[in-house]
Amino acid sequence: MNLSAQNQFASKASQLLAWGHWFTLANIGLALVISLAYLFADAAPTTAIGSVYMVVTWLSHTAFITFLAFVLTIFPLSLIFPYPRHIRGMASVLATAGMTLLAVDAFVYYNLGYHLNYSALGEILSLFWRNVTNTPALSTLLVSALILMILAYQLLISNYAWHHLAQLKRLRFGRYISASLVLCFALSHSIHIWADAALEFDITKQDNMLPLSYPTTAKSLLAKNDLLDLEQYEQARQVNVNGPTVSFVMPATLPSCELDADAPQVDIRVFSSTQQLAEFVAANPALQPAAKLLHPVAKQDALFNLVYGLPSYYRQSLTKDSIDPLWRRTPITFDTNIDAYRFIHSDPSPRVRIDQDNTAPLDGQRKVFAFALEAEHPSRITAISQLWSNDPQLQQSTLIAQPQDIIATVLSEYWDCDELARAALIANSLTHTDAMANINYSQGVFIAMRKDRITLLNSDGSYKHISATEGFGVDQQLDIPFLIQGLKQLKKFNAQ
């Protein structure tokens, strides 16, 4: 009797394990669908090998974490408590919770640029709160429908796999799928090892894309086997960001910009205090909130961003030699009342005016931007302000922009001078803030922004991550490839 009971127990456990593998395989398919959001959250790879790496990593890593979840939850339950009906029900609930968590993480990453973590809990909750308060009924309906759909899927595949276990065991495609995923896993790590050693940033920039992603790196592995040139590796990683050594190099040629007769004229009003801005906005009801504006606390740096459309990394070099903004080319005319830039020749009928603390009434025919430089925390490197505009297309934007993005918007969106904007600026249009790395430089600190996350990299190598909108610290590993790409973009006009 005892032997029979043990055999029956072992038989149930064996059946549950076989069922669990098919249940997990079906959940790998669902996880792959949900995790597509990570692939579309960032810019696509620019090389063929980068695209191949993205696909094989997506397949293998998603399958791995799904299988790992099975091993840590359903597998031990099947051995300890081998009662099919209960296990199938518990597995469906656990899988629903896991897939819902994956969907939440994908949503957060798509919107904020980082995964779920405790240090960013405030901004994550704020993201959910904004979505719920904007459309409470729709948000509740969508979330409820998503959870119910996932649960229904889990119950369906759970029951189907159990009742058709004998037929499924005779199928061979499961083995082929498993072998393919293992091959993808090995291939993705092999490609990453090569890319890390060869400094192929189109591959290594994807390191933080998927949740719980810790790909093998080349430094420890190849150095251990005396196959890595450590000096070359460290030289590529450690980019000097010290401003005093900057030598500005004028581009050999710049694209022309032909303006239509009806091309809009632009006023940019920048105020020293939020009180001045508030009074100006109150007197001009056409102005409405546009994007949030991340700017250096150092006012001279923010003003340089605004006038030149460049990071203030180049401020000393350009102002010392009294060089006009690169974007100011015939027939573009310009004027400003900012004392530091009086050396720039004033045009009698400027298409662009940049004025500081000018409260004169607005001309209704001109596009207008306005913001304040006052910082709530003067000891910080950056501050967040509200940008105002009378352009309906830019109002109520949820994007985070920088002062240099304003002139980029004027060139690209208002005057159709995309080529000049790309050649003369290091900035993004307010309608396309992810076109290139969102970078800046102030007080000896390199600033890189990705969605809500800001990385502040000091010249001594120390760094910290903060939330752009809330200002709290974000606990996350340093994204070396992203920073190197940003630093290369920063040095676009540098002789070094």
Image: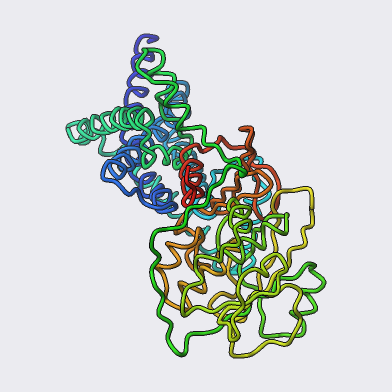
Q: Which residue shows up at 41% across the image and 49% down it?
A: 34
Left or right, 112 with respect to 384, comes to left
Percent across and percent down for residue 166 are 22, 33
Q: Is residue 128 left or right of residue 64?
A: right
| Residue 216 drawn above or below residue 357 | above
Q: Residue furthest front?
A: 321
Q: How many marks?
A: 0
Q: Residue at x 51, y 68 (%)?
A: 408
Residue 376: percent from left, percent from top: 79, 57
Q: In the picture, residue 343 is in which quadrant?
A: bottom right
Q: 293 and 476: which one is in front? A: 293
Q: Is residue 440 shown left or right of residue 163?
A: right
Is residue 92 visible in the rendered structure shown here? yes
Q: Quadrant of the N terminus?
A: top left
Q: Residue at x 40, y 35 (%)?
A: 66
In this rendering, is residue 347 above or below 311?
Answer: below
Q: Position of residue 345 (x, y in %)?
A: 60, 74
Where residue 71 sits, quadrant-wise, is top left
